[in-house]
Every structure is written in C-alpha cells, then in structure tokens.
Image (tube, rainbow, N blue to C red):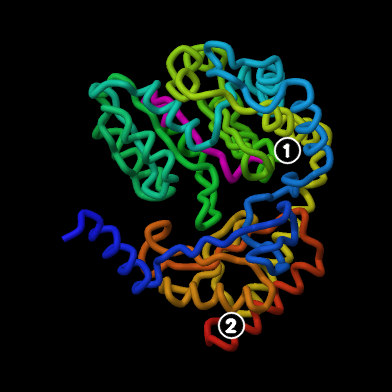
C-alpha cells in the first residue's frame, strides 16, 4: 500500500462525481477576449469588473515603478519593505473609502487573516459570522481562539439570537461578506449595523465583490448604505474590480495603527511589488476621477440579466453583476461549460465544495470591458446550449 493511495483515490472520486477542477491556461492579457488553451474565446468568468487588468494607464504605472524601484520589495513592510508608493496608495485608498486610514496587504485573502486574529485573540472573545462567508473569512476565524457563532445567511434576526447567546464575550466581532461571490446577493449592512450597536459589537465587512461595483464610483457597500463612521472595518481586494493584486483594510486611524503592530501578514510576509502597488494606485486614481466604468458595468449587467431571464434561465437571487446560471448537479454544469467553450464562450462551472451540493452553476461575470455585441454573442450561445441540453433557453 502506497502512502499516496489516498491522493489517487480522492482524485478519482472527484473525477467520477464531476467535481474535478480542470484548470485552463490563458496566454493573453485579461480583457473581454482571451486566448484559452490556444483558442480565442469571449471571457465571461474573470473578476475584472471594470476592465482595469490590461488598462494602458495601469500597465504604464507598473512599468514606471519597475524602472524606478526594481522588481521586488526586498523585505516585509515592518523592516525595510515599505516604499513611499505603499504610503501613497494607502492615503489614496483612505480617500476613496472616505475613512481615516488604510493598510495595504498582499491579498484580500490574507487581509482577513490579518484582521480577525488581531481583533479577537482570546477564548473570552466571540465571532459572529454569516454561514456563507468566503473561505478567507472562515480560515481567518480558524486562526483565533474565539468562540464561534454562525448565523443564517443574511438573517439579521438570527444574528441577534446568536449575539444574545454570546453577549458575555469580552469582544464581539460580526463578520459578513458585502457581496456574496457565488450568488451575487448583498448583505443587509444597515440592519447589521443597528444590531451591532445594541450589543456593542465590532463590525467587519469583506467587500471584495463590492469594491468598484457598489456605491459612488465603486466605493463599496458601506458607501452604498451610507454607513460611513458606522461600520468599523472594511476589508477589500485589489484583484477584482481594481484589476491587479493586493488587499487592504480601511477604517479609523487607531485600527490601522494597531494592525501595523499586530497583523501577522504585515509583519511576517514580504510587501507587495512596486509594479503591483503602482498599478493599484492608478486604478484608484481613475475611480477617484470618474464613475463612468461603474455605470457601464451596471448597464451591461442589467442588459445581460434581463435577457437571460427572457431565455428562461434561473439566475438565482443576484443583486449585482455576478450572474449565477443555476444548473443543479456538478456534472450538468461541467457539461454546459464545455459546450459553451466549444461555442467560443469561456464560462467555468462551479460546484461543491465552492457551493452546496445540488447548487452547481455557471457563474457569469459581467465586465465594463464587454461590448453589447459580446453580450449578445454570449446570450446566443447560452440559448443554443440550453436548448441542446434541455436546461433553459
């Protein structure tokens, strides 16, 4: 018996159940169109909401930063890795988010791991987390010794019940995604804020899919609900609407100062590269100047979703440009995705464990980079494949 038998067995099971993730290879810049496995296709599954990933202004900013600062950061932020670029970006992010300060980190994933264990670091503390929160939040919670209370998805009354159960905790931290990435629904942040005030709880939102999408010029879900100074911690990512890579935490100046002393990813992992940092700043500056891309994103999303409904597809409860096309079993979603690819549409299937069993889907990600012709081409492909497979259209 080989010590690797369990790996072979698990891989076989994943393939047999239609859960094996076939990872495709891209050989072109991110945009409305891609070269995937050597084939030119319409890109309907990237998180590049605003088309920034290959924007000339971002590319130029990255080039200039490499020429000035070199390729790598050389150290962690707390020793010798903090560039003036990092400081400037943090100021721009704070201005964009309408908060006192921000801290820039390596990714949105590690931003959650930076915040959660730093805020609730004892068994005397308690975390209250939505049952559908992102994996990075789940992992961040796992790094704490705090008591854990999982409340029903987007259910303020169940959150209240859980807070009542854990009201004796020394510190209470409520965590929610802003936009839930698989369904595209929005957290009831206004109601969460009201309940948090009753229980003197700290509030935290991971707005990965709300940045660049919701609020004035894409300022996010806190701006969408007009909750400035009423929601404590905003976590964001630069890898989706901003088109680059990196994460940040925004809030009161004392919170950010505290994280610079306590957050392990800040203290023990190298800083982001000059190129990434400069490109992120270019994206923020564009949004500080104009919300035109955000408007185009929503125009595209509304057009696509309305027409998908007319074709008879189930697009779930989405309130954002995320458009889940619900297909049920993972094998059905995998087949649908392969058929779409044959039609020149790149839209990946998503199944368990990313979503619950029986909730597999094609998740279509609309972008401001898409033209109306792109959307019409995609709609026609969905209609054709849906009719062929008997799953809509």
Residue displayed at 39% across by 22% down: 119
> Could you say where residue 357 lies in the image, as x and y percent from the top left?
36, 66
Q: Tell me the residue that label 1 is attached to.
A: 216
> Could you say where residue 102 lies in the image, as x and y percent from the top left?
60, 21
Q: Is residue 186 above or below residue 225?
A: below
Locate residue 141 relative to residue 287 in the image: left or right.
left
Residue displayed at 70% across by 40% down: 218
Disc 1 vs disc 2: Cβ atoms closer than 8 Å? no
The numbered dot on residue 336 is none
The quadrant the C terminus occupies is bottom right
Q: Nearer the viewer, mark 1 or mark 2?
A: 2
Residue 87's quadrant in the figure? Answer: top right
Q: Nearer the viewer, residue 149 or 87?
A: 87
Q: Secondary structure at mark 2?
A: helix
Crowding at mark 2 (Cα within 10 Å: few <14, some 14-19, many 20+):
some
Q: Is residue 351 above or below residue 145?
A: below
> Could you say where residue 146 lies in the image, as x and y percent from the top left?
27, 28
Residue displayed at 45% across by 29% down: 203
Question: What's the CA distance linking mark 1 and mark 2?
Answer: 37 Å
Locate residue 327 relative to residue 155 in the image: left or right.
right
Q: Is residue 142 above or below residue 346?
A: above
The quadrant the N terminus occupies is bottom left
Indicate yes or no whether the magenta region holds residue 198.
yes
Q: Which residues are magenta?
A: 196-211
Crowding at mark 1 (Cα within 10 Å: few <14, some 14-19, many 20+):
some
Locate residue 266 relative to residue 304 in the image: left or right.
left
Residue displayed at 71% across by 31% down: 275
**The furthest residue to the front:** 2
Q: Mark 1 vs mark 2: which is more N-terminal? A: 1
Q: Is residue 121 above or below residue 293?
A: above
Q: Tell me the residue that label 2 is attached to.
A: 386
């Amino acid at each position: 018996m080989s010590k690797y038998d369990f790996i072979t067995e698990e891989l076989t099971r994943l393939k047999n159940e239609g859960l094996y993730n076939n990872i495709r290879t891209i050989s072109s810049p991110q945009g409305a169109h891609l070269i995937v496995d050597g084939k030119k296709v319409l890109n309907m599954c990237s998180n590049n909401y605003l088309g920034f990933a290959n924007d000339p202004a971002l590319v130029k900013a990255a080039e200039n930063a490499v020429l000035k600062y070199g390729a790598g950061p050389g150290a962690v932020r707390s020793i010798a890795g903090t560039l003036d670029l990092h400081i400037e970006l943090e100021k721009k992010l704070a201005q964009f988010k309408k908060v006192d300060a921000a801290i820039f980190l390596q990714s949105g994933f590690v931003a959650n791991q930076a915040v959660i264990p730093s805020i609730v670091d004892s068994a005397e503390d308690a975390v209250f987390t939505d049952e559908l929160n992102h994996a990075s939040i789940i992992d961040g919670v796992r790094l704490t010794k705090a008591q854990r209370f999982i409340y029903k998805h987007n259910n303020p009354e169940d959150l209240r019940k859980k807070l009542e159960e854990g009201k004796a905790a020394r510190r209470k931290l409520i965590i929610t995604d802003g936009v839930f990435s698989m369904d595209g629904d929005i957290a009831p942040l206004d109601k969460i804020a009201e309940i948090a005030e009753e229980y003197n709880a700290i509030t935290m939102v991971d707005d990965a899919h709300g940045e660049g999408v919701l609020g004035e010029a894409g300022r996010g879900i806190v701006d969408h609900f007009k909750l400035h100074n009423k929601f404590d911690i905003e976590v964001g990512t630069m890898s989706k609407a901003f088109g680059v890579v990196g994460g940040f935490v925004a809030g009161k100046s004392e919170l950010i100062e505290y994280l610079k002393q306590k957050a392990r990813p800040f203290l023990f992992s190298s800083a982001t590269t000059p190129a990434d940092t400069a490109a992120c700043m270019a994206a923020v500056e564009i949004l500080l100047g104009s919300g035109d891309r955000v408007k185009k994103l929503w125009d595209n999303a509304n057009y696509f979703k309305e027409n998908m409904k007319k074709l008879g597809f189930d697009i779930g409860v989405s309130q954002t440009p995320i458009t889940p096309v619900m297909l049920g079993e993972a094998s059905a979603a995998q087949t649908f995705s392969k058929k779409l690819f044959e039609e020149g549409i790149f839209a990946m299937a998503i199944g368990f464990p990313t979503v619950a069993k029986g909730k597999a889907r094609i998740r279509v990600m609309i972008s401001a980079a898409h033209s109306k012709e792109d959307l019409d081409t995609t709609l026609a492909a969905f209609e054709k494949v849906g009719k062929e497979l008997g799953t809509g259209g």
